[in-house]
Amino acid sequence: MFEFWKKNGKNKQLEALMQRIQMNVSNNYKDAAQLNLKEFEDEIRELLENGKLSDAQKAYYEGKLQDFKAQMKNFTHKDQKPFWT
Protein backbone atom coordinates (compact mmCIF):
# COMPACT_ATOMS: atom_id res chain seq x y z
CA MET A 1 0.00 0.00 0.00
CA PHE A 2 2.78 2.44 0.88
CA GLU A 3 5.27 1.18 -1.69
CA PHE A 4 5.99 4.71 -2.95
CA TRP A 5 7.59 5.64 0.39
CA LYS A 6 10.21 2.94 -0.03
CA LYS A 7 11.44 4.43 -3.29
CA ASN A 8 12.18 7.83 -1.76
CA GLY A 9 15.28 8.38 0.29
CA LYS A 10 18.16 6.02 0.80
CA ASN A 11 18.43 2.29 0.35
CA LYS A 12 19.65 0.67 3.57
CA GLN A 13 21.48 -2.20 1.85
CA LEU A 14 23.39 0.09 -0.47
CA GLU A 15 24.15 2.56 2.30
CA ALA A 16 25.60 -0.25 4.45
CA LEU A 17 27.78 -1.44 1.57
CA MET A 18 29.00 2.11 0.93
CA GLN A 19 29.90 2.47 4.58
CA ARG A 20 31.86 -0.80 4.50
CA ILE A 21 33.74 0.33 1.39
CA GLN A 22 34.65 3.63 3.01
CA MET A 23 35.80 1.95 6.23
CA ASN A 24 37.95 -0.55 4.36
CA VAL A 25 39.50 2.15 2.18
CA SER A 26 40.28 4.33 5.20
CA ASN A 27 41.89 1.35 6.97
CA ASN A 28 43.84 0.43 3.81
CA TYR A 29 42.14 -2.99 3.56
CA LYS A 30 42.54 -3.20 -0.20
CA ASP A 31 41.20 -6.70 -0.85
CA ALA A 32 38.14 -6.19 1.36
CA ALA A 33 37.39 -2.81 -0.25
CA GLN A 34 37.56 -4.32 -3.74
CA LEU A 35 35.27 -7.16 -2.67
CA ASN A 36 32.78 -4.71 -1.17
CA LEU A 37 32.86 -2.65 -4.37
CA LYS A 38 31.93 -5.75 -6.37
CA GLU A 39 29.08 -6.49 -3.92
CA PHE A 40 27.90 -2.87 -4.22
CA GLU A 41 27.85 -3.08 -8.01
CA ASP A 42 26.01 -6.42 -7.97
CA GLU A 43 23.44 -5.12 -5.48
CA ILE A 44 22.75 -2.03 -7.61
CA ARG A 45 22.30 -4.21 -10.69
CA GLU A 46 19.91 -6.55 -8.83
CA LEU A 47 17.82 -3.70 -7.42
CA LEU A 48 17.58 -2.05 -10.84
CA GLU A 49 16.50 -5.29 -12.50
CA ASN A 50 13.76 -5.71 -9.89
CA GLY A 51 12.66 -2.08 -10.22
CA LYS A 52 13.32 -1.29 -6.56
CA LEU A 53 15.18 1.99 -7.12
CA SER A 54 13.64 5.27 -8.18
CA ASP A 55 15.25 7.36 -10.90
CA ALA A 56 16.78 9.68 -8.31
CA GLN A 57 18.21 6.74 -6.36
CA LYS A 58 19.51 5.19 -9.55
CA ALA A 59 21.36 8.37 -10.48
CA TYR A 60 22.74 8.83 -6.96
CA TYR A 61 24.00 5.27 -6.48
CA GLU A 62 25.38 4.93 -10.00
CA GLY A 63 27.28 8.17 -9.41
CA LYS A 64 28.64 6.79 -6.14
CA LEU A 65 29.63 3.57 -7.92
CA GLN A 66 31.59 5.53 -10.54
CA ASP A 67 33.27 7.58 -7.80
CA PHE A 68 34.32 4.43 -5.93
CA LYS A 69 35.61 2.81 -9.13
CA ALA A 70 37.71 5.87 -9.93
CA GLN A 71 39.01 6.09 -6.36
CA MET A 72 39.97 2.42 -6.25
CA LYS A 73 41.31 2.04 -9.79
CA ASN A 74 44.84 1.17 -8.60
CA PHE A 75 43.88 0.32 -5.04
CA THR A 76 45.35 -3.20 -4.95
CA HIS A 77 48.32 -4.85 -3.33
CA LYS A 78 49.92 -5.69 -6.67
CA ASP A 79 50.05 -1.99 -7.60
CA GLN A 80 51.66 -1.04 -4.30
CA LYS A 81 55.25 0.10 -4.75
CA PRO A 82 57.77 -1.04 -2.17
CA PHE A 83 59.41 1.83 -0.36
CA TRP A 84 62.94 0.46 -0.92
CA THR A 85 62.90 0.70 -4.74
Image (spheres, helix red, strand yellow):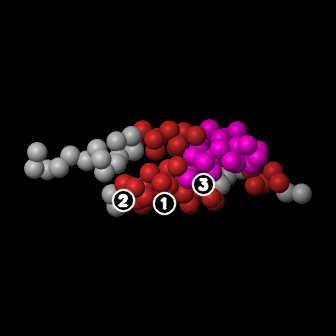
Cα separation, mark 1 vs mark 3, equals 10 Å
User: Callout 2: 10 Å neighbours few (<14), some, many (20+)?
Assistant: some
Left or right of 72 in this view: 46: right
Lower sequence index among marks 3 and 2? 3
Question: Magenta part of the protein: which range?
Answer: 39-61
- Compare marks 2 and 1 and give the one earlier in the sequence: 1
Residue 82: give x, y in percent of width and height. 17, 49
| Percent coordinates x, y for residue 27 in the rendering | 34, 61
Relative to 75, residue 28 above or below: below
Q: Is residue 15 left or right of residue 35?
A: right
Within 10 Å of the Cα at label 1, are there few (<14), some (14-19), or many (20+) other Cα atoms?
Answer: some
Q: Give the residue pinned by disc 1.
A: 20
Identified by mark 3, the residue type is: Leu
Q: At label 1, which amino acid type do we have?
A: Arg
Front residue of this view, candidates 54 and 33 = 33
Residue under numbered circle 3? 14
Is the residue marked by circle 3 packed among few (<14), some (14-19), or many (20+) residues within 10 Å?
some
Depth check, front residue: 23 or 9: 23
**Kind of element beneath mark 1:** helix
* Residue receiving disc 2: 29
Viewer-nearest of discs 2 and 1:
2
Q: Number of labelled discs?
A: 3
* Real-space Cα separation, disc 2 to disc 1, in angstroms: 11 Å
Q: What element does badge 2 sit on?
A: loop
Q: Nearer the viewer, residue 64 or 56?
A: 64
Are circles 1 and 3 on residues that touch, CB within 8 Å?
A: no
Q: Main secondary structure of the magenta part?
A: helix
Task: Give the spatial CA distance, label 3 vs label 2.
Answer: 19 Å
